Image: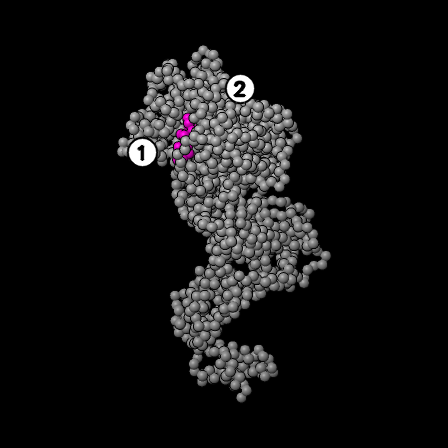
């Protein structure tokens, strides 16, 4: 698997600082008031950060932020980590609960092979060292949705350690340059999910559903190598893609299959790192970057006004758009980790160390798993770049939008147009329209085959490119129709009558003498204006290239 | 209550079948009787139920599952009639310690916390017994959550040692006979599986399951004059055994003779996919070979087990037992287990830590006692646990949490784990040096009166009483207590044999040979037993070879 | 055997380790009010009395004896089965779908949910002003 080289590091670092600076030096006003504008403006700030770097005020001290992440991904498996009850998103309460999940006394954990494989595959995909021996521990705390009073996890010796996750961050606008970044992976561990609490405030009670209790989780710990919300969000997105490609987790944040906790602190560059806070349960892709950036700013504001940062846990209030302290208990927490006595050490093998005559059901061969790893996103992007000559940022965007790559492939399949054209249309016009209408790819009114047909018409020079744009807009509004139908209804076919075109050109030249003069003076843009005028006159039915040719011939004569 | 003086003395596991009462037979013998139609499962079950009622004052049972037992007996009878018996355990009454889950039958662990808890599943070992047609007579009494060495600290009262009421003991005390319920000097049964030991000792069942974490099966077995077997850790499933210390607990087997224990082990042992701490090696049930020649046997005597607190009587019996082996041709060697003196403190730390963890699930939310407080979850949990646990349990939870605190973990818990390795290695070294089996006392002395026992607190008592037994739990080794002789007070004394890991069959073979040499007397209980009254006095056996 | 016993007896009395000795209660220093509060909070079990605190102190003093053992370069023993492979279960759904059995032992059930009190904890019950000498460490008793 090709590892992405770290390019633009210097630029990246500078960007990082200025990302912080640019984003977080704008005033210290009330937190909620200017929040929304700051968040909305953030994208543009980030985009312009390259230039705002030059605008740093002298005398004011810079701030740098440090962000680490703990990501919990639900393992995609039929049954739970230590019991044989089903893993399923929506089911009647407590219907997917075994005696072990309910912590009935005397029940014991039995490890699910599939979960181990998922952990190893994920570790391999993230360049981790797989520990041939790993251990399970109990982490003790009381909570209504934790029936045993402890969670089984892998604190001391997890299944995978010391890996790395390469991801890309857009430097300027949506699909301009991409900076390649890496974040180190501290460890990947297997652990149990907890049940769910539903608060019934009306009757002053909490309802507990243990369907989720015991589902296998992969906890991926990312070292604090990130410096802002954007980086964190992109790292999470890349991890999501990797997990989905591996099939080890569906990683759908909306369904709670991927949950992120962030550890955030700020400091002045060159000085020791500050106290960190933990922001828990960032469960929305949309708000991930926001919440982190909010917290960074909150800490800066706090410190700049002489306050101090407490080592506490906070959660993000989506409605208010701010982090709030979760601390509702005095006293320090101590999880009193203890080895899980009911699970002897987990031993993994490679082809060399595989014991002879071992039951294949009872042993896991790391090498075998490595050989059968599916294609990872970075490899997919490489392939796209090689196969279609795409620029890196395009391949990033194609993968980052849910469903876009598939859409792209489907269009490519059905059209004769060149990849460059397809890419252009998919990433600009198509994606742009989706964003404009806040739609997901799956909700698109334009199907891949419709777009393919449209591009074929364009490619076969049946319509002009401006006509094509028009057709696309109409397609969007009337999904039932085919491009061919729209073209014929709107009479957008390219003019085939050369004579008529020549006449139009002559008429335009005559009607716009000042532009002609402009052109003769040497203004290069004048010709485009003329072409545009002819196109308009031709009701978008003329091929600009042909127009240009005719105009030039007519002008020279 | 009327009493019939019936004197009898029978070899509990030997010949002379003709006049022997059915209840006094070995498991193998009564199984044969069932097959031959000499008695039906229902009759046998009813005999036991009747005896349970008569010995109610022993408080050996928390729950007597009469209806269930009779129904099972009926089914067994049908099988026998068709000639389709399931095996040696078909129709045999057994009792189960009340910390094993039994589906549909209350499982209390002698705790207020679980006093109304009815599990929806059977422990694997219970299921195995039932699958073999065994008859479940009831759930036996114990120390709360198996914490204790006297079976005195349970929510349903203490267990009384049947030997308190035996002719042998009373003769020594030279007291006038009086009603059992008024006897103020009754003796403890040992613990924590005292109920199971008493149930077997009083003939109310042919076998009972106990649990053994630090000696909880062997200790009461020694005090009640029965065989108490602790299998190797990993041989028998713990699924359904409500745990005390997961890394040391094993289900224990209590029977009146070694052969019976082997039969039960044969049914219970083997890999259980529901218990990841059972070994995956295939297990073949065995019939114990009859050992005749012990000349190749090497018996080790650990010198560190000779402690000042050991009673002279037990010391003397231990010595005589060693002489017996030697006189029969075995090689008896003094060995050393250097870290013996640390095993109690090591056990203390590891045990309390695990208890702290295992008890965290008892919060009243999903099962068990629940308090009336509703202000917050933590307040509810706290009050539930306060009301549900006795002082012993609560004390261990607090100690265990202390040792698991971040700042203490390395110094206490990890340190104890290291010492545990040293202790386990002591045994490995000894067994590797050519020793086949170790011979040690089981307890410091005979059963003490309850009044005396409760003078010390539970932890101190456990620390004292577990001294010979708990090292085997730390190392996961098989061990068995065999009743050897009666003390000057007419009370049973047992001796222990310990073997290397997974040498259970060999260990029981040696134990069976040893048992045959010593002829431990049958308890003489003054109860109404129809069978017994017909036996004549002339049946008394000659003196016991190891008697003082 | 008698000679052997006599030898052993002499050895035990002279220098050998005693299997146990009466523990010395060092008391006081180790178990502070802070530690008490901390443990009660973590374990959700209250000491309830001075005796209980004294018992903990004894337990700690007893455990101190471990430090006399030299465990240099000794690996902790977590499981006697440490050399054996952990059993792996196939990923099949074989349990669950038994909501009645799951709920049957609970005292409080609403519709098929377990029912817990509204919040996790209540600041009132963890007032650090309370001292362990007071009979009830938990406000619960006052309710």
- Whether B468 is among the magenta residues is no
- The image shows residue A256, relative to residue B231, as above or below, that is below
Label 1: few (<14), some (14–19) or many (≥20) C-alpha neighbours in 10 Å = many
- The x and y percentages for residue B520 are 44, 22
Residue at the spot 48% in from the left edge and 16% down from the top edge: B184
Mark sitting on residue B85: 1
Chain letter of disc 1 in the image: B
Q: Is residue C125 visible?
A: no
Residue at the spot 65% in from the left edge and 62% down from the top edge: A10
Of residues B329 and B127, the one nearer the viewer is: B329
Residue at the spot 65% in from the left edge and 60% down from the top edge: A14
- The x and y percentages for residue B326 are 50, 27
SS at mark 1 in the image = loop
Most extreme residue toward the bottom is A557
Q: Report the residue marked by disc 2.
A: B452
Of mark 2 and mark 1, the one earlier in the sequence is 1
SS at mark 2 in the image = helix
Chain letter of disc 2 in the image: B
Label 2: few (<14), some (14–19) or many (≥20) C-alpha neighbours in 10 Å = few
Q: Is residue B37 visible?
A: yes
Q: Quadrant of residue C100?
A: top left
Gap between marks 2 and 1 measured at Cα: 48 Å
Q: Quadrant of residue B353?
A: top right
| Region in magenta | B253-267
Q: Is residue A227 left or right of residue B29?
A: right
Q: Is residue A294 left or right of residue B56?
A: right
Of residues A276 and B398, the one nearer the viewer is: B398
Most extreme residue toward the top is B176
Of residues B100 and C35, the one nearer the viewer is: B100
Most extreme residue toward the left is B82
Mark count: 2
- The image shows residue B352, relative to residue A437, as above or below, that is above
């Amino acid at each position: 698997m090709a590892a992405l080289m770290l390019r633009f590091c210097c630029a990246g670092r500078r960007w990082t600082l200025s990302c912080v600076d640019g984003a977080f030096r704008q005033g210290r006003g009330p937190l909620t008031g200017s929040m929304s504008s700051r968040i909305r403006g953030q994208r543009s700030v980030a985009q312009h950060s390259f230039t705002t770097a030059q605008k740093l005020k002298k005398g004011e001290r810079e701030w740098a932020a440090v962000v680490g992440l703990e990501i919990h991904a639900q393992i995609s498996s039929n049954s739970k980590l230590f019991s044989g009850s089903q893993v399923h998103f929506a089911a009647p309460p407590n219907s997917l609960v075994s005696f072990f999940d309910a912590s009935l006394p005397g029940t014991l954990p039995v490890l699910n092979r599939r979960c181990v494989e998922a952990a190893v595959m994920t570790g391999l995909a993230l360049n981790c060292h797989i520990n041939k021996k790993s251990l399970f521990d109990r982490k003790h705390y009381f909570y209504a949705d934790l029936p045993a009073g402890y969670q089984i996890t892998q604190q001391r010796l997890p299944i995978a350690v010391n890996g790395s996750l390469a991801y890309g961050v857009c430097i300027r606008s949506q699909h301009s340059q991409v900076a390649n970044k890496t974040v180190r992976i501290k460890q990947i561990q297997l652990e149990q999910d907890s049940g769910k609490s539903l608060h019934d405030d009306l009757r002053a009670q909490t309802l507990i559903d243990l369907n989720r209790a015991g589902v296998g989780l992969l906890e991926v710990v990312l070292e604090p190598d990130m410096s802002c919300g954007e980086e964190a969000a992109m790292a999470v997105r890349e991890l999501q893609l990797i997990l989905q490609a591996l099939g080890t987790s569906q990683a759908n944040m909306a369904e709670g299959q991927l949950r992120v906790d962030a550890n955030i602190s700020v400091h002045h560059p060159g000085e020791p790192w500050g106290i960190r806070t933990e922001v828990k349960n960032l469960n929305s892709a949309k708000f991930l970057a926001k919440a982190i950036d909010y917290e960074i700013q909150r800490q800066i504001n706090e410190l700049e006004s002489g306050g101090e940062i407490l080592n506490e846990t906070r959660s993000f209030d989506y409605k208010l758009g701010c982090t709030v302290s979760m601390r509702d208990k005095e006293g320090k927490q101590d999880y009193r980790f203890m080895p899980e006595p009911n699970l002897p050490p987990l031993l993994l093998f490679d082809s060399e160390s595989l014991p002879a005559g071992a039951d294949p059901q009872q042993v896991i061969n790391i090498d075998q798993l490595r050989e059968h790893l599916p294609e990872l996103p970075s490899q997919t992007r490489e392939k796209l770049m090689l196969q279609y000559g795409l620029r890196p940022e395009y391949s990033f965007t194609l993968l980052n939008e849910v469903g876009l790559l598939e859409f792209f492939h489907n269009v490519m399949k059905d059209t004769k147009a060149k990849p460059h054209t397809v890419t252009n249309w998919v990433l600009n016009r198509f994606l742009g329209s989706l964003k404009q209408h806040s739609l997901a790819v799956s909700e698109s009114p334009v199907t891949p085959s419709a777009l393919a047909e449209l591009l074929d018409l364009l490619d076969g020079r049946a319509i002009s490119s401006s006509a094509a744009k028009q057709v696309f807009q109409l397609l969007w509004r009337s999904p039932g129709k085919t491009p061919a139908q729209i073209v014929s209804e709107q009479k957008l076919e390219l003019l085939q009558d050369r004579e008529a075109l020549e006449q139009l050109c002559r008429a335009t030249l005559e009607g716009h003498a000042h532009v002609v003069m402009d052109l003769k003076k040497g203004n290069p843009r004048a010709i485009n204006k003329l072409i545009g005028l002819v196109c308009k006159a031709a009701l978008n039915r003329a091929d600009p290239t042909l127009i240009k040719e005719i105009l030039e011939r007519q002008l020279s004569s | 209550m009327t009493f019939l003086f019936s004197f009898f003395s029978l070899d509990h596991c030997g010949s002379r079948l003709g006049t022997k009462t059915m209840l006094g037979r070995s498991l193998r013998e009564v199984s044969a009787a069932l097959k031959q139609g000499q008695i039906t499962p229902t009759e046998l079950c009813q005999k036991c139920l009747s005896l349970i009622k008569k010995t109610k004052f022993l408080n050996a049972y928390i729950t007597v599952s009469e209806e269930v037992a009779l129904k099972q007996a009926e089914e067994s009878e049908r099988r026998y009639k068709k000639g389709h018996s399931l095996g040696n355990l078909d129709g045999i009454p057994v009792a189960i310690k009340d910390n094993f889950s039994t589906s549909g039958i209350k499982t209390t662990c002698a705790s207020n916390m679980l006093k109304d808890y009815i599990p929806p599943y059977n422990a694997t070992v219970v299921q195995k017994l039932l699958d073999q047609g065994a008859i479940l007579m009831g759930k036996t009494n114990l120390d709360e959550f198996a914490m204790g060495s006297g079976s005195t600290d349970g929510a349903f009262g203490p267990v009384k040692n049947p030997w308190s009421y035996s002719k042998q003991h009373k003769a020594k005390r030279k007291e006038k006979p009086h009603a059992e319920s008024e006897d103020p000097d009754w003796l403890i049964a040992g613990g924590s599986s005292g109920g199971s030991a008493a149930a077997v000792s009083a003939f109310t069942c042919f076998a009972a399951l106990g649990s053994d974490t630090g000696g909880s099966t062997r200790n009461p077995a020694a005090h009640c004059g029965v065989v108490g077997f602790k299998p190797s850790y990993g041989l028998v499933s713990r699924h359904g055994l409500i745990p005390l210390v997961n890394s040391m607990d094993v289900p224990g087997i209590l029977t009146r003779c070694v052969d019976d224990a082997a039969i039960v082990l044969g049914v219970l042992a083997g890999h259980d996919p529901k218990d990841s701490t059972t070994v995956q090696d295939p297990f073949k049930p065995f019939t114990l070979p009859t050992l005749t020649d012990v000349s190749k046997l090497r018996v080790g005597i650990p010198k560190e087990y000779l402690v000042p607190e050991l009673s002279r009587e037990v010391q003397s019996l231990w010595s005589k037992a060693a002489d017996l082996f030697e006189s029969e041709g075995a090689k008896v060697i003094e060995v050393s287990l250097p870290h013996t003196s640390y095993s109690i403190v090591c056990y203390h730390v590891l045990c309390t830590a695990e208890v702290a963890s295992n008890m965290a699930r008892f919060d009243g939310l999903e099962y068990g006692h629940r308090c009336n407080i509703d202000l917050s979850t933590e307040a509810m949990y706290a009050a539930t646990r306060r009301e549900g646990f006795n002082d012993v349990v609560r004390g261990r939870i607090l100690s265990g949490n202390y040792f698991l605190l971040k700042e203490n973990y390395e110094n206490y818990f990890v340190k104890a784990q290291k010492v545990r390795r040293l202790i386990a290695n002591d045994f490995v070294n000894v067994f590797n040096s050519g020793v086949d089996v170790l011979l040690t006392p089981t307890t410091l002395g005979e059963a003490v009166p309850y009044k005396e026992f409760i003078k010390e607190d539970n932890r101190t008592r456990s620390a004292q009483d577990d001294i010979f037994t708990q090292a085997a739990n730390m190392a996961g080794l098989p061990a068995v207590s065999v009743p050897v002789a009666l003390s000057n007070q007419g009370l049973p004394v047992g001796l222990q044999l310990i073997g290397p890991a997974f040498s259970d069959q060999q260990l029981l073979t040696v134990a069976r040979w040893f048992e045959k040499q010593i002829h431990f007397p049958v308890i003489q209980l003054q109860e109404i037993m129809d069978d017994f009254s017909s036996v004549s006095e002339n049946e008394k056996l000659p003196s016991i070879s190891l008697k003082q | 055997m008698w000679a052997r016993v006599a030898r052993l007896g002499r050895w035990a009395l002279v220098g050998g380790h005693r299997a146990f000795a009466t523990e010395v209660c060092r008391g006081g220093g180790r178990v502070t009010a802070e530690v008490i509060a901390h443990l009660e909070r973590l374990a959700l079990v209250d000491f309830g009395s001075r005796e209980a605190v004294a018992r903990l102190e004894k337990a700690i003093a007893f455990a101190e004896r471990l430090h006399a053992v030299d465990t240099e370069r000794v690996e902790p023993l977590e499981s006697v089965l440490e050399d054996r492979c952990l059993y792996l279960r196939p990923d099949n759904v074989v349990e669950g779908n038994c909501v009645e059995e799951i709920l049957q032992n609970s005292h409080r059930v609403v519709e098929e949910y377990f029912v817990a009190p509204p919040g996790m904890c209540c600041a009132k019950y963890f007032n650090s002003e309370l001292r362990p000498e007071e009979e009830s460490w938990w406000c619960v008793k006052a309710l």
